[in-house]
Amino acid sequence: MITCKEAVERLWEYLDRNLLRLEQDELDEHLGVCRHCCGELEFAERIREMFRRPIGPELSPETRMRLDTLLRGLERQ
């Protein structure tokens, strides 16, 4: 079974459905027994959902671009 560190490192790819089948199965197995990592997954899902909502018109195009860049950087980590 994978460790919590490995599980957390794979969460964004898991949400994007970009894991190999074996990696997904290992993460599913880990999530089936680890409450901590289930909480991490729930948090990541909520963050992703929050940023999927349209950003209000009060943000400038420059600010939107900076937010998009920041989020892409976080996904690569």
Image (cartoon, helix red, strand yellow):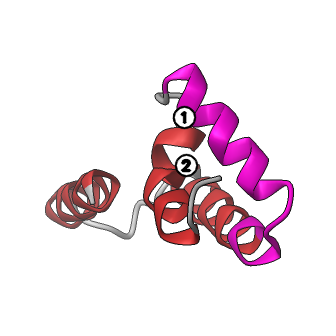
Q: Is residue 28 magenta?
A: yes
Give the residue at x 27% y 60%: 77
Q: Residue furthest top?
A: 21
Q: Label 2 crowding class (10 Å Cα cut-off): few <14, some 14-19, many 20+?
A: few
Q: Residue furthest front?
A: 1
Magenta residues, start to end: 20-38
Residue marked by disc 1:
23
Q: Nearer the viewer, residue 71 or 3?
A: 3
Examine the image and state in which quarter residue 28 appears.
Answer: top right
In the rendering, at what x and y percent does residue 59 appear? 32, 68
Residue 52, label in figure: 2
In the rendering, at what x and y percent does residue 6 appear? 47, 60
Q: Earlier in the sequence, mark 2 or mark 1?
A: 1
Q: Is residue 18 magenta?
A: no
Q: How many marks?
A: 2
Q: Nearer the viewer, residue 61 or 3?
A: 3
Secondary structure of the residue carrying numbered label 2: helix
Q: CA distance from mark 2 to mark 1?
A: 26 Å
Q: Nearer the viewer, residue 73 or 2?
A: 2
Examine the image and state in which quarter residue 62 appears.
Answer: bottom left
In the rendering, at what x and y percent does residue 16 appear? 52, 35
Q: Amino acid at mark 1?
A: Glu
Q: Nearer the viewer, residue 4 or 57?
A: 4
